């Protein structure tokens, strides 16, 4: 045992130590033994000179005088043999026994204090003698016998040097060990508790070893400990024993860096002398499996990140400081570190050569995607003057790679909405399957972003860009290309309750973002849900977002932030948005066609132009550079209509120019086209169907095919001849240009006049054409009064029906000959209505012609007001 000042609890022998070597007996003779030997020689000499006591009259028997001498002689022989065995034969055996039988079980290693040249450490533990650990029986038995005789050994003050032979015998350090008394018999347990001064060795050598260890090049390590230890057993000095012990650490024997866990991470703004900066507070828990107890003084570190290339020097990111760190035996260590970032170096934020990413992008990208980001921690000057210089000298040249565990933040976007959505179809001349052939979306994007709890500083967003994948019901619908920077603004929203975290409201105006549809069938499902589902659809967006931010460190870009959110898309339905089969969206379009003009004619086709008024009942607007739509009736193709440069706004959209080609004969549907015209001019209910095709949008055939599954059928609109006003504005803002609002029947025949004496009739006709003259080439008509024939008209001389004049009076036909059905009830009714008006019905087959185009249609008119005159 030793006292707290390093002195043993028992007094040492005042006699000087006798030098020992391998030839020196373990139990050397002392000066007292030499004096005893000299006295015995003198006594023997006197005994030889004196006569025997038997001759001088003594009465003892000779046998009694011999037994003590024989016993002494036997003991001397045994002692001599023992000395010979332990002095000349047993040293190597005893050394081998000691190395295998003695084990040290450490209890605690505590650092009493750090000194200017090293560490004053207190070591506690148990020295255990266990003979069963010795492999060879001869060594075990001889060792037990020898230690049974010696019982205990006491070492003197000594110095231990620890070196590494494979590193040029570099000196790791030295330790001063005070005297220790140890029981050496089998089964003895000696508790030791002493204070030792530890001094670091070659600092440069320690650095080389540390670098190899941290870089994984330290496959094995051979450690050599050497000391000259003075020993004694009781009053017998055993001399100085040279102790040399090697230990090999390989594979699992090499200590691993302790594991750690980041318990808390907090980023905040901090006022600095040069302005404002950022601070990071990190709380770590480090695993400690060792029986050590000491306090680490405050230390300083430089936090660095890797450059663009492996050979580039590390880039300075922040300064970190630690406070007094208390380490207790086999207890996890809680470490609090504060790092300060004064500014971001330009080399940290600049893109690497041949890349679009900077070193900062690489670090943040890994961290935000849940991957470990590697930082490099290097020692620097300590903030405390009490920290010994030798500590900073060692840690300043050691760079420790530290993994910053990545975080997956889940869904940062709590709410995602699109407002003022505008769709743009592609340029018709764009090549298919190119970015220019994709439809485009413009909208005001509003997102509420949940800020991570670590971010406790002001942040504003100035620009955003992203590549987003759009999903519907878990399937990928397409890709929204937002790679162009979009201006943005942001406002921080403080939490309402403690359970809520801070959020950031981000708004951005997205303009002409291409939408690449990759799944046509899925897109069809989306359109069907929007058109007929009644409640809109919910799209999922998964994106990697680049954000240009403004912080206390200045402006920099955070790239590839994972974002995922729900995007509700309003239904393409009017009113409340609830689908009603009896109230389809087409009934809210309210198409009005007027200013009809024939641009070109052929024997069986017409090319027409017209102005159309439509009502957009949805919340969406659209730009349509070009679209060609098929015109059908009851599934039969009659022609097609083309719209160019359409800007579809909200509500009423007036004066939309449309070009149409009427060519039913091109698809062998001439009879169907003739029947539709006949029904239409007769006032019967007819419908037209608009349907897209792959050719509707030449640059995007897939969209045309997808839309072709949604036919839009609506009643055939009435033809109006009223032109727009001189200021090009509708007559009625609520329902622009509504010719014949009070009469839903055709306005082809305005009125008729019967002339009894001349047996003729005239008609006032209103041409549906605004710019072209219509010719009537033949008439075969019959008039009825209550199903009774009044008369017939057969006329085959062509006459012109010019466009309606500005007064809307129409044109009066020539007097057409009437063959009266004399004596009939019908003719009597006509005569009875002389001077008045008679309601008649009419059936006719009429030949019509415009330039080169001609057709024969039938007409069924009812309740025509005919004036009867002489």
Image (cartoon, rainbow, N blue to C red):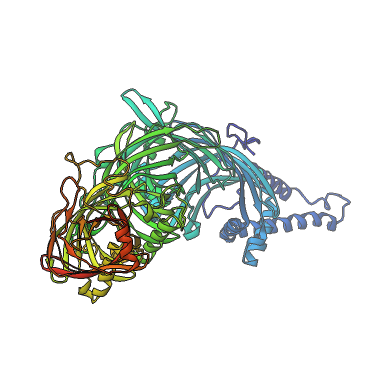
Q: Nearer the viewer, residue 456 or 829?
A: 829
Q: Position of residue 522 (x, y in %)?
A: 39, 64
Q: Nearer the viewer, residue 220 or 163?
A: 220
Residue at 27% across, 65% down: 631
Q: Is residue 154 above or below residue 428?
A: above
**The quarter of the displayed image where residue 93 is located:** bottom right
431 to the left or right of 45: left
Q: Is residue 649 visible?
A: no
Q: Position of residue 528 (x, y in %)?
A: 41, 61
For this orientation, the residue located farthest to the top is: 273
Q: Position of residue 590 (x, y in %)?
A: 33, 51
**The quarter of the displayed image where residue 537 is located:** bottom left
Q: Position of residue 259 (x, y in %)?
A: 50, 49
725 to the left or right of 236: left
Q: Is residue 79 above or below residue 669?
A: above
Q: Specify the quadrant that holds the N terminus.
A: top right
Q: Is residue 526 above or below residue 620?
A: below
Q: Specify the quadrant that holds the C terminus.
A: bottom left
For this orientation, the residue located farthest to the right is: 59
Q: Nearer the viewer, residue 293 or 497?
A: 497
């Amino acid at each position: 045992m030793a006292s707290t000042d390093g002195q043993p609890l028992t007094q040492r022998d005042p006699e000087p130590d006798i030098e020992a070597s391998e030839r020196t007996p373990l139990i050397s003779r002392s000066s007292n033994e030499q004096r005893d030997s000299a006295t015995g020689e003198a006594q023997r000499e006197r005994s030889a000179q004196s006569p025997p006591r038997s001759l001088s009259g003594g009465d003892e028997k000779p046998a009694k005088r011999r037994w003590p001498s024989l016993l002494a002689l036997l003991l001397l022989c045994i002692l001599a043999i023992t000395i010979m065995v332990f002095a000349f034969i047993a040293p190597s055996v005893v050394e081998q026994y000691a190395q295998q039988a003695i084990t040290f079980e450490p209890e605690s290693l505590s650092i009493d204090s750090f000194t200017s040249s090293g560490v004053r450490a207190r070591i506690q533990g148990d020295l255990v003698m266990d003979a069963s650990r010795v492999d060879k029986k001869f060594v075990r038995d001889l060792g037990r016998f020898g230690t049974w005789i010696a019982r205990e050994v006491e070492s003197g003050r000594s110095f231990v040097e620890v070196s590494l032979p494979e590193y040029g015998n570099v000196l790791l350090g030295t330790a001063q060990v005070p005297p220790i008394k140890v029981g050496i018999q089998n089964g003895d347990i000696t508790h030791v508790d002493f204070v030792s001064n530890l001094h670091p060795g070659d600092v440069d050598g320690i650095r080389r070893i540390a670098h190899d260890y941290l870089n994984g090049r330290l496959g094995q390590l051979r450690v050599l400990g050497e000391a000259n230890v003075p020993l004694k057993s009781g009053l017998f000095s055993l001399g100085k024993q040279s102790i040399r012990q090697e230990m090999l650490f390989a594979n699992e024997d090499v200590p691993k860096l302790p594991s750690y866990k980041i318990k808390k991470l907090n980023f905040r703004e901090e006022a600095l002398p040069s302005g404002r900066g950022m601070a990071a507070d990190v709380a770590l828990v480090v695993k400690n499996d060792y029986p050590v107890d000491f306090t680490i003084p405050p230390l300083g570190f430089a936090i660095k990140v890797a450059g663009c290339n492996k050979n580039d020097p590390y880039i300075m990111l922040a300064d970190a400081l630690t406070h007094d760190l208390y380490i207790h035996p086999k207890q996890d260590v809680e470490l609090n570190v504060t790092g300060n970032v004064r500014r971001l170096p330009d080399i940290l934020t600049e893109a690497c050569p041949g890349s679009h990413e900077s070193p900062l992008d690489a670090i943040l990208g890994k961290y935000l995607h849940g991957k470990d980001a590697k930082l490099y921690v290097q020692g620097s000057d300590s903030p405390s003057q009490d920290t010994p210089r030798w500590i900073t000298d060692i840690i300043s040249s050691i760079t420790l790679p530290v993994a910053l565990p990545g975080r997956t933040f889940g869904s940062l976007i709590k709410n995602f909405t699109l407002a003022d959505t505008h769709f743009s179809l592609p340029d018709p001349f764009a090549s298919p399957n190119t970015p220019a052939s994709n439809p485009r979306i413009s909208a005001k994007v509003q997102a509420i972003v949940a800020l991570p709890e670590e971010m406790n500083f002001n942040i504003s967003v100035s620009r955003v860009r992203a590549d987003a994948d759009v999903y519907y019901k878990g399937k990928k619908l397409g890709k929204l290309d937002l790679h162009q920077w979009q201006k943005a603004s942001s406002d921080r929203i403080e939490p309402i309750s403690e359970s809520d975290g801070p959020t950031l409201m981000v708004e951005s105006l997205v303009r002409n973002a291409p939408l690449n549809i990759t799944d046509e069938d899925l897109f069809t499902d989306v359109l069907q849900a929007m058109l007929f589902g009644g409640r809109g659809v919910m799209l999922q967006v998964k994106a990697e977002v680049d954000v240009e931010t403004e912080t206390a460190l200045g402006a920099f870009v955070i790239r590839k932030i994972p974002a995922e959110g729900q995007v509700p898309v309003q239904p393409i339905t009017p009113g409340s948005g609830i689908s009603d089969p009896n109230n389809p969206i087409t009934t809210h379009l309210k198409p009005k066609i007027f200013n009809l003009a024939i641009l070109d004619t052929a024997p069986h086709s017409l090319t027409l132009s017209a102005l159309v008024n439509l009502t957009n009942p949805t919340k969406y607007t659209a730009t349509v550079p070009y679209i060609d739509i098929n015109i059908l009736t009851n599934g039969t193709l009659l022609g097609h209509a083309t719209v160019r440069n359409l800007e579809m706004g909200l509500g009423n959209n007036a004066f939309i120019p449309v070009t149409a080609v009427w060519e039913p004969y091109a698809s062998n549907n001439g009879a169907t086209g003739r029947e539709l015209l006949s029904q239409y001019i007769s006032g019967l209910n007819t419908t037209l169907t608009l349907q897209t095709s792959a050719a509707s949008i030449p640059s995007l055939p897939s969209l045309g095919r997808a839309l072709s599954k949604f036919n839009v059928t609506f009643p055939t609109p009435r033809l109006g001849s009223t032109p727009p006003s001189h200021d090009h504005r509708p007559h009625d803002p609520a329902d622009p240009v509504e010719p014949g609002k009070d009469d839903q029947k055709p306005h082809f025949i305005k009125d008729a006049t019967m002339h009894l004496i001349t047996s003729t009739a005239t008609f006032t006709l209103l041409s549906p054409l605004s710019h072209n003259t219509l010719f009537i080439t033949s008439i075969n008509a019959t008039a009825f009064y209550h199903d009774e024939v009044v008369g017939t008209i057969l006329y085959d001389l062509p006459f012109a029906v010019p466009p309606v004049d500005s007064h809307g009076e129409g044109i009066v036909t020539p007097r057409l000959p009437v063959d009266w059905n004399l004596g009939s009830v019908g003719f009597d009714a006509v005569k009875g209505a002389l001077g008045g008006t008679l309601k008649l019905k009419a059936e006719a087959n009429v030949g019509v012609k415009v330039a080169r185009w001609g057709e024969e249609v039938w007409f069924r008119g009812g309740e025509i007001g005919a004036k009867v005159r002489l």
